[in-house]
Image (cartoon, grey):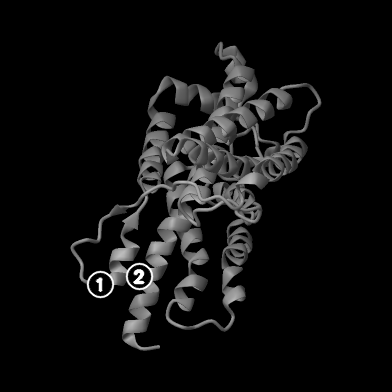
Amino acid sequence: MTGDAILSVLLAMLGGAIRVSTPFLFVSLGETITEKGGRINLGLEGTLVLGAMSAYAASLATGMPWLGVLAAACAGAVFGCLHGLLASLKRVNDIALGIALMLLGTGLAFFWGKPYIQPQAPTLSAIHFGGWSDSPALRAALDINPLFIAGILLAFAVQWALANTRAGLTLRLVGDSEPAARAAGSRVVPVRILATVLGGALAGIGGAFLSLYYPGSWNEGLSNGQGIMAVALVIFARWKPLRCVIAALLFGAAGAIGPALQSVGISQGYYLFNAAPYALTLILMVLTCSRDTSLKGAPGELSLNR
């Protein structure tokens, strides 16, 4: 490739990393909050898809895409509440429950979403940060959706809240040691339910980004397993919100390799490059998991530690 082609690929990967990483960012932040409370939610794939469908339907019905984002957050919160309530019952395994709710969420989204496959709903607009440049590639790379900016700010807010607020301390205590949390007077079950509700709401917003911005449509193959991959991303980020930002951008860049190469005319192996995020997930899990470090930073009450 020539120097201009390499630059075009890098700029396309930059823009693609920002776009592709946004759903990963919201879902991983939501799962971080949930797991900090000592519970795993593997149903986030279903929540993501249901949020995407809800956002698209609400945007089409109202003509206001930001109401679609709100609808997605509400749908995710409802599913998170369902997971939280059922997981609080005795002898209910949260991992098995998450898989069941993942199937339920995707099934409901596909069933209710069939009327919305063809109509075009209003979508979210980007903020154009590259207007100063004469390079079309750079201008395209710097078209950034407000949800990405909100996700970055949210990561800083969650990191600060976990370390410096009473609510953050309570959540971490509940996730690390249920007996200690009860001894301190914390209400373990309501805290975990609330954490799961917040996690579900954020996953729903991640779905809204998919249907209302990139790719900006509703169809049954919209997610491609991003909800499940985000759970692995949380482990890679060691349950730290700011590391989730870095991990999400890394996964986003991997997902943008195929389209970036196609933009300069390299189409051979396109589908192989589309598998890059999944391959990266496996590679990172192999490289970072060991007897001593695989669960470093994991809340003590997670079923991973049992």
> Looking at the image, can residue 195 be seen?
yes
- Crowding near pointer 1: few (<14 within 10 Å), some, many (20+)? few
- Residue 206: where, in percent of width, then height? 51, 44
Residue furthest to the right in view is 91
Hey, what amino acid is under mark 1?
A: Ser
- Residue 74: where, in percent of width, then height? 54, 30
Hey, what amino acid is under mark 2?
A: Leu
Identify the image quadrant of residue 96: top right
Residue plotted at (44% across, 31% down): 162
Per the image, the residue denoted by label 2 is 11
Identify the image quadrant of residue 43: top right
Q: Does 129 sit above or below residue 204?
A: below
Dot 1 falls on a residue whose secondary structure is loop
| Relative to 244, 189 lies left or right | right
- In space, the residues marked 1 and 2 are separated at their CA atoms by 10 Å
- Residue 302: where, in percent of width, then height? 66, 35
Per the image, the residue denoted by label 1 is 135
Residue plotted at (48% across, 55% down): 214
| Relative to 137, 104 lies left or right | right
Q: Does 28 sit above or below residue 129?
A: above
What mark, if any, has residue 240 been given in the picture?
none
- Look at the numbered discs 1 and 2 and tell me whether their residues touch, using CB distance below 8 Å: yes
- Crowding near pointer 2: few (<14 within 10 Å), some, many (20+)? some
Image label count: 2
| Relative to 213, 179 lies left or right | right
Q: Nearer the viewer, residue 133 or 227?
A: 133
Give the foreground label among 1 and 2.
1
